[in-house]
Image (cartoon, helix red, strand yellow):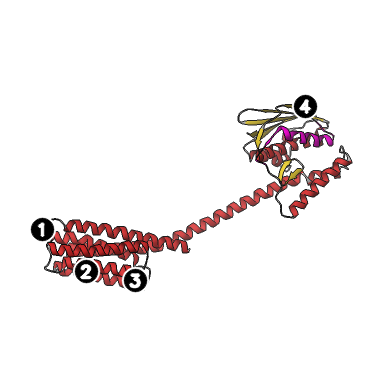
């Protein structure tokens, strides 16, 4: 909150400086018209007003109370010289009003923060009003009302700004806290989902194989996969954040871009070791950003894992095509198929590991299947 208090004080000082200098300039220009006042009096007013302007400039740089007192004293002296000696007429009164009711009153913007400053403002306002009353010879006139209104407006404006800024600062601070809490919650949820996917694609897949006595997988392939899972869990326990490279294979190294053709082969070999022959068709080399490549390969590997587990066949076909904007993979098998409407909403494997994973990088997935007619999944990822 100290920063907001500094900004509040800077705003008040800057406003005082500009208002005071502007009103002083208006008054000096009005006094310079021929016949408004005599030359000696105008010269004194000009010199003292320049002193007040210098104090206003110093106030804009520093909030020292000394500059404020000296500036008000100079303004009161300038007003006294212009108003009191010899009485004033209509044009002179009009010319002096911006000086005593605007320039000197601008200091009231800085005089509402403490009792001492409020007393100082009251004393200065009383002296200025006394000058106007003595100069005009009456208490009830337009000049007195104008000067009083100027002082009241400046004091109220200073009080309002001084109290509004801290309130606004507190609201901004509370909004910032709410935004940080929401962002933290979103990041936590994203990490939870990523962790669930990671475990689903690695450790849970291995446990499923073990639960089925490693059916369809050689003991060596199962041991290799379990070793990779153990390495991943060890990194997680030590606080590392692994980056996925392919389904069941995570490492801690990242690259800016990777050719798709150099990574599809590792997916093919992995599923070949587990008894699923994968035939590739179409594009051999496509350059993708790392995060898009990760999502694309993991979704592709999850589709192949579903073929291996559920299709009842030992072969799958993957066709890769691309254009200027998208890369598409069509995973096809001639297996048993299934009714799309019969998929339970509680089964999150395809939804999280394929659909949502691709959506997060700007892609998508579509599923086509029917009993006895096999299954086709179309994966899309942006280039």
Residue topped by disc 1: 35
Q: CA distance from mark 3 to mark 2?
A: 20 Å
Tell which circle, 3 or 1, labels the residue nearer the N-terminal end. 1
* Crowding near the residue tagged with mark 1, few <14, some 14–19, many ≥20 C-alpha atoms within 10 Å: few
Question: Would you say the residues marked 4 and 2 are in contact, meaning their CB atoms lie under 8 Å apart?
Answer: no
Q: Please tell me whether mark 3 or mark 2 is closer to you in this view.
A: 2
Q: Can residue 380 be found in the magenta stretch?
A: no
Helix, strand, or loop for circle 2? helix
Res. 377 mark: none
Q: Is residue 172 left or right of residue 222?
A: left
Residue situated in front as seen by the camera: 231 or 135: 231
Q: CA distance from mark 4 to mark 1?
A: 106 Å
Based on the picture, tell me whether residue 273 belongs to the magenta stretch: yes
Residue depicted at 32% across the width and 68% down the height: 67
Q: Which residue is mark 4?
A: 373
Disc nearer the start of the sequence (3/2): 2
Q: Earlier in the sequence, mark 1 or mark 2?
A: 1
Q: Which residue lies under the disc numbered 2?
A: 77
- Stretch of the chain drawn in magenta: 255-278
Q: Relative to 119, is 32 above or below?
A: above
Label 2 neighbour load within 10 Å: few <14, some 14-19, many 20+ = many
Side of 95 relative to 156 (left or right): left
Which residue is rendered at x = 23% and y = 68% of the image? 76
Give the residue displayed 83% in from the left and 31% down from the top: 314
Binning the other alpha carbons within 10 Å of mark 4 as few (below 14), some (14 to 19) or many (20 upward) gives: some
Where is residue 11, by image quadrant? Answer: bottom left
**What number is the disc on residue 117?**
3
Question: Residue 164 in the image: x percent, y percent?
Answer: 41, 61
């Amino acid at each position: 909150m100290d920063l907001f208090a500094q900004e509040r004080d800077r705003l008040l000082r800057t406003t005082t400086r500009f208002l005071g200098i502007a009103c002083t300039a208006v008054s000096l220009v009005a006094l310079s018209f021929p016949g408004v006042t005599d030359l000696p009096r105008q010269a004194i007013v000009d010199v003292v007003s320049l002193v007040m302007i210098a104090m206003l400039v110093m106030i804009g740089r520093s909030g020292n109370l000394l500059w404020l007192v000296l500036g008000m004293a100079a303004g009161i002296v300038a007003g006294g010289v212009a108003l009191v000696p010899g009485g004033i007429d209509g044009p002179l009164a009009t010319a002096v009003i911006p000086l005593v009711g605007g320039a000197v009153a601008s200091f009231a913007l800085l005089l509402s923060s403490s009792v001492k400053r409020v007393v100082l403002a009251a004393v200065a306002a009383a002296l200025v009003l006394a000058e106007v009353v003595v100069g005009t010879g009456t208490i009830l006139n337009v000049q007195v009302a104008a000067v009083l209104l100027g002082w009241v407006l400046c004091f109220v404006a200073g009080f309002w700004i001084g109290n509004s800024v801290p309130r606004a600062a507190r609201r901004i601070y509370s909004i910032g806290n709410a935004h940080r809490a929401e962002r933290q919650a979103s990041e936590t949820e994203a990490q939870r989902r990523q962790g669930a996917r990671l475990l689903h694609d690695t450790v849970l897949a291995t446990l499923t194989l073990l639960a089925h006595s490693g059916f369809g997988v050689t003991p060596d392939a199962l041991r290799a996969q379990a070793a990779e899972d153990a390495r991943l869990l060890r990194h997680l326990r030590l606080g590392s954040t692994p980056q996925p490279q392919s389904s069941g294979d995570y490492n801690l190294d990242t690259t800016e871009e990777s050719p798709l053709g150099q990574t599809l082969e590792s997916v093919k070999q992995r599923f070949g070791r587990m008894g699923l022959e994968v035939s590739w068709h179409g594009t051999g080399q496509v350059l993708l950003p790392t995060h898009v490549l990760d999502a694309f390969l993991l979704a592709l590997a999850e589709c192949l894992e579903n073929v291996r587990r559920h299709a009842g066949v030992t072969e799958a076909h993957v066709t890769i095509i691309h254009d200027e904007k998208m890369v598409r993979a069509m995973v096809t098998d001639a297996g048993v198929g299934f009714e799309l409407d019969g998929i339970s909403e509680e089964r999150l494997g395809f939804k999280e590991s394929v659909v949502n994973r691709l959506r997060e990088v700007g892609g998508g997935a579509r599923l086509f299947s029917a009993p006895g007619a096999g299954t086709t999944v179309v994966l899309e990822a942006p280039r």
